[in-house]
Amino acid sequence: MKKFLIRFGTLLSTLALFFALATSGFACIYTTHQPEEPADLERFKK
């Protein structure tokens, strides 16, 4: 597992950042589940 994380860790973190930025403008379809967004993510919104 450690070798996997070392080899693919940067790819996984890049994908996580991409999906966070891509979905930051969308609302959740479930009205009861609206998690708080980090304040730092606000600067990436248009």
Image: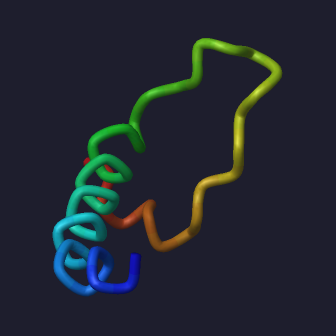
Image spot of residue 20 (x, y percent): 37, 52
Image spot of residue 44 (x, y percent): 30, 61
In this image, 2 relative to 40: left or right?
A: left
Residue at the outermost right position: 32
Please, is residue 3 above or below residue 40 in the view? below
Residue visible at 20% across and 78% down in the picture: 10
Q: How many marks overall?
A: 0
* Front residue of 30 and 8: 8
Residue visible at 71% across and 34% down in the picture: 34
Image spot of residue 42 (x, y percent): 44, 61
Residue visible at 71% across and 44% down in the picture: 35
Image spot of residue 19 (x, y percent): 31, 47
Q: What's the image's color scheme?
A: rainbow
Residue visible at 23% across and 57% down in the picture: 15
Quarter of the image for the N terminus: give it: bottom left
* Front residue of 13 and 4: 4
In this image, 15 relative to 1: left or right?
A: left
